[in-house]
Every structure is written in C-alpha cells, then in structure tokens.
Amino acid sequence: MRIIWIIDHYSSEPKYGGISRQYDFALELGRRGYHVVVIASGFCHFTHSYISEKPVKVSRLSKHVHYIYLKTSSYEANDGIDRARNMLDFMNKVLKYENIIARKYGRPDVVTGCSVHPLAWVAAYKTAKKYGARFVAEVRDFWPRIWVASGDKKSFDPMVLFFGMVQKWAFHRADRIIYSMFHGEKYICGELGIPKSKTYLIGQPMDCPRFDRNREKTDLLPREMQEFLKDSFVCSFTGYYMAYEGVYVMLEALKILEEKGLPVKMVFAGSGQEKEGMERYIRENHLQNALVCGRIPKEAVPALLSHSRICMAHLEVEGRKEVYKYGVSKNKVNEYLYSGACTLYGFLYQDDEVAVSGGGMMFEPYNTAELADKIEYVYRLPEEEQRQFGLKGRMYIRKTHSVEVLTDRMIEVLFG
C-alpha cells in the first residue's frame, strides 16, 4: 500500500472550521486504497482556539486515513510576531514527531508540503529526503508576492526576502509543484523560471454528495438566520469580513435596493475585523434587510447557500489591480456555483470560472451601483431563468472540481 503524507498547517476536519481541501482528497484517496496521513496544527487559525491541547492528537477518519494535530503556539491576530512564531513552531513540531509518525503509520512514499506559508515546504522536504520519498510542493497563495502587490510590505522587507528565498529553494527542489490558482503557471514558470513540466493545476475539490446531504440541515443555522431566510429573496455571503472581500460594497448595494423598495435581503455569515463596522453601517443607514452573523459550522453552509437566490463574492485590494492577476483559490466560490443560486462576483479578471461556467455574472470591484443592478436583474428574472445559473454552475463544478475528478489528477501527479 502506498503511503501519502500531507503536511498542511491550516487543514482540519470540517467540524473544526479549517480548510477542507486535504480532508476531501484524503477521504477519496483512502477509498481508493491509499494510506493518507494529514499533519496539521492543533491550533485553529480561523477560530483562534485549540482543536486539541494535547501534544499530539490523532483522528481516525477511516481505515486508511488519519489526521494528526500537533500542538503549536497560539496567537490572537493573523499578523505579527506571534503568528510568525506559530509557523516556525509548526515546522519544528513536524520535524520533532515525524519519526514517531513513521513508526506508527508507515514511511511515506510521497510527502506533500502545502503552503499558505512556505515553512511547511521545509518540513516536507526534510521529511521526504529522510525517507527517500517524492517531495511535492503545493501552493495556494503566492507569498511573498501578494504582500508586495497589495502594498502591505516593501520588496526589501526582511520577511519578503526570507519567504521569497524559501519559495525559490522549495520550488527548485520539488519533484512536482501543485498550484490551485487559475493562472498560477504564469507566475511560477514565467516569473520564477520553474520548468512547466513539473507544474500542475489542481483546483479546489468539491465533495458534491456531502454538500447535497447537508442542504436541509437548517437546524444547524442560528435561529435568527433560520427566520431571516423564510419566504425571502436572499443574497448570501460567507467568509471573512474584510474590506477587500467587498462587505461594504454589498451593504451599499443593499441600501440602493431598499431605497427602490425591492424586498431583497442580505445575510452574512463569517468573521473578521470589519464585523463591528458592518453593524455600524447597518444602524447608521437604517437598513432593514441585512443580517450579520458569526461563523457557522462548515456542515451548515450548504443549508444557507441552498436557501439563497444569489451568492455574493468580491476580491480586490482597492487601488491594487495586480494583486490577483494570476487568479485566486477560493473554495467558497465552488460552493456558491454548486449551490443552485446565481453567483455574483466582483473580480477584475473576466476569464474567472464564474463567468466561464455560466453559473453567475461578474461585476466591477467596488462598483456598488453595478452590483445593485445585477441583483435587481436576477430578482426580476422568471424563476426558471434564475435556475439556469444554478444548473450551469452545478454542471461545471461536477465536471471540473468534483473530488473524484481532481483525485484522478492528484494520483497522476503524486505517482505518475
């Protein structure tokens, strides 16, 4: 039996609120007879709380699939020295416990190191080299490029220089490189000079049957949200409450719609630094049809989206159009497209999958009037025409992003 180790700091089982990409791949690989060990942090980046405070916690998902959570240092904000310390701690804990993991679950044939942060690549490379395994580097966010492009850091900042050095080091040593952004090869090959022959696009997987099973789990939603959804034309947003995610653009569009007297509601489920600002905006502008909630369980997201007519997304750092020119890796857009609703996406690049799939429409980032117009357009469509967006989106996701289709590709990359 071939053994795959996946080292991904921010992965977790969906019930803990982390990124589910590796969870979906691991279960499907396990069903196909591969033994998969996912190594992650016991501290959740998204809730800033511990999944487990044990030095090592093991979750057995199936006969062939195990999650191993390593206790790392905590942090209260997603920037600053404490988070950097947490990244370094995770790398060191992987290297500390890898021999114990190997004795218990077997020496790996392949070790995949998954960024967001590149220290996971270092841990994966050293582990792979020790066991004579193939080293695969997976990248889902182009640190440090995105820091400079967004204006958060200067090109000569020590963190930028350090992470850039680690990135080049890892990419040159990787046997294979997996990226999940639509045009990621333009950066990896075009700017960094990595041979195209060792780069592979594998987007975000979608467990369509699991999503469908969870569609009716409205009991997992907060009571207030359940009442809000009843007999309404609802536009929903899930994710981070950040300005670049367009939360104020959406509220401003709602203000326009309320002034027109349209009975459109907006519900927000998530977390982030703009939550108080959003609530203040609603109060000051006397909006009647907006509801801002905290994060909801991953298993509850399908129920919210499936009871919505429109799903809203937005991504652009204002005044920084170069930040996302190589595409993005947003799992929630897959969920939006598969939900059966129409997806409206504020994104600069019109070849995005929302437009390509026919499952929704693009609008200019930060253009509140255009978003309001598109919501009104969908609202006034006959229901059968509204449903066409959802049908096209579901068909596209099944064809291009279902976990079964992408696992075929993953096996080819890992062992081909």
Image (cartoon, rainbow, N blue to C red):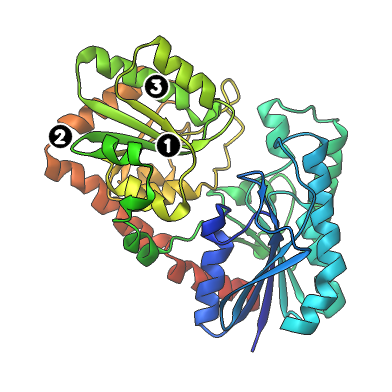
Question: Disc 3 on helix, strand or loop?
Answer: helix
**Mark 2 / mark 1, whichever is N-terminal:** 1
Secondary-structure class at tag 2: loop
Figure quadrant of residue 170: bottom right
| Residue neighbourhood size for the residue with mark 2, other residues' Cα within 10 Å, grouped as few (<14), some (14–19), many (≥20) | few
Image quarter of the C terminus: bottom right
Quadrant in which the N terminus appears: bottom right
- Which residue is pictured at 75% across the width and 67% down the height? 56
C-alpha distance separating marks 3 and 2 = 22 Å
Could you tell me the amino acid type at mark 3?
Leu
SS for callout 1: loop
Residue at point 40% right, 49% down? 301
Q: Is residue 173 visible?
A: no
Amino acid, disc 2: Leu
The Cα–Cα distance between marks 2 and 1, rounded to whole angstroms, is: 23 Å
Q: Position of residue 403 (x, y in %)?
A: 46, 67
Check disc 2 and report the residue beneath it.
381
Residue underneath mark 1: 350
Count of marks, rendered view? 3
Above or below residue 372? Residue 28 is below
The label nearer to you, 2 versus 1, is: 2
Mark 3: few/some/many CA within 10 Å (<14, 14-19, 20+): many
Residue 276 spot, x, y in % from top left: 53, 22
Which residue ends up furthest to the front in the rendered image? 223
**Which residue is identified by label 3?**
251
* Left or right of 377 in this view: 125: right
Query: From what the image shows, is residue 404 above or below residue 296?
Result: below
Front: mark 3 or 1: 3
Q: Earlier in the sequence, mark 3 or mark 2?
A: 3
